[in-house]
Image: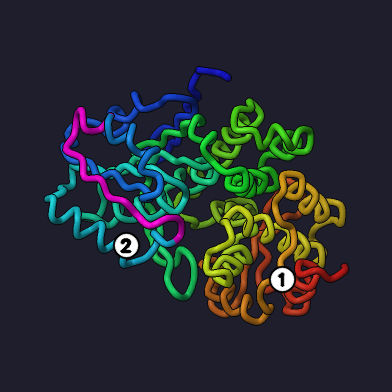
Amino acid sequence: MSTESTTLHVGGASPYDVVVGHGLLDHLPGMLGDGVQQVALLFPGELGELAQPVLDALVEQYDVLALGLPDGENAKTASVANDCWEALGERGFTRSDAVVTVGGGATSDLGGFVAASWLRGVKVVHLPTTVLGMVDAAVGGKTGINTGAGKNLVGAFHEPAGVLCDLSLLTTLPGQELRAGLGEVIKCGFIADPEILRLVEADPAAAQDPASPVLRELIERAIQVKIDVVVADLKETGGVDGHPGREALNYGHTMAHAIERATDYEIRHGEAVSVGCVYVAELARRAGVLSDDLAARHAAAFALVGLPTSWAGAGFDDLLETMRVDKKSRGNQLRFVVLHELGQPRVLAGPSEDDLRAAYDVLSGGAR
């Protein structure tokens, strides 16, 4: 196991570093910067033991407000955000104070939104504890909470002051949780970095081993994919030469978010992304823009690490209604990120309902 840390720099108007390695708390004060007196530490209540070393490190230099959150997507509500705002107000948090999050993707989303909205923006540093948090939620500055209408429909762009990805924390993850995070990693392989797919296909067991250099490389590559896309298109205004820009990171997510809502978020996000990518690959195949072989490679790659590639937990009409309020929709027109070739994402606008239904028939167990 390498003791060296890797620093991945995120450029742009608000530059910051993502540090990957082991035992990274020494980097935290530097990321918080000068002038910070109070720090709100947000973490799921069930992760109190993991958050304790961070709390111990912070109290040496700062006045710390520890805020335990509900677990998972249950934290991403207006009610929980309001509880956090009230706590910050009672403690007199000013614009020069900061937020630190310890937890998975939902914690980063909620904590980032609290930081973005408190006094119109205070510093936030993320310490993700899951693969999903490291490669997705903690990097890129998207924050958000859920509503009854769907996932992440309320939020803000608010880049962190830094991200610390301590790989030692991955040894605490249940195997199914670690595998779920690989859904976002493999997605990055399809949209931008085929080497990710090669690594997974060559040694799927190593890809799931928290102590493996293969998993570390996968995480670093997926983070770099996100950095490259986000720096080019922070606020999802579009790419160039037909590339969808930041929207490419939502590959598979239109169906994934519909499935998450249909299950009341009981399915893990990375599992839903796996299913969503298989769905959109079949949709692109039926629309005539993706080859049979590359469509089939989707299901094969996700299955290698034990992720689901089929799902039949709701009727198509219910899922379609949710997809119509997806953030990528424009008016009444559905938009999907699809592949034309490996690493070449494009937007498919207004696919036929026949293709949408037929792709779901395959996803839910029917034949091509």
Q: Which x, y percent locates residue 118?
A: 23, 55
- Work out whether 10 lies above or below 333: above
| Marker count (numbered) | 2
For residue 160, side relative to residue 310 (left or right): left
Marks 1 and 2, how far apart in space? Answer: 31 Å
In depth, the one of 346 and 114 nearer the eye is: 114
The residue labelled by disc 1 is 312
**Residue shown at 71%/62% (left/top)?**
280
Does the magenta-highlighted stretch encompass residue 356? no
Q: Secondary structure at mark 2?
A: helix
Give the mark nearest the N terminus, 1 or 2: 2
For the record, the magenta segment spans 57-73
The reply to whether residue 13 is visible in this rendering is no
In the image, residue 255 above or below residue 340: below
The image shows residue 242 at horizontal and vertical percentages of 65, 55
Task: Say if 183 sits above or below 73 in the image.
Answer: above
Taking depth in this image into account, of 267 and 189 the one nearest to the observer is 267
Q: Amino acid at mark 1?
A: Ala
* Amino acid type shown at disc 2: Val
- Is residue 164 shown left or right of residue 184? left
Whether the magenta-drawn stretch holds residue 70 is answered as yes
**Residue found at x 53% / y 36%:** 170
The residue at 21%/33% (across/down) is 59
Residue 288 placed where, x, y %? 82, 64
**Which part of the image, by quadrant, shows the C terminus?**
bottom right
Q: Position of residue 221 (x, y in %)?
A: 60, 34
Q: Secondary structure at mark 1?
A: loop
Q: Which mark is residue 80?
A: 2
The image quadrant where one finds the N terminus is top right
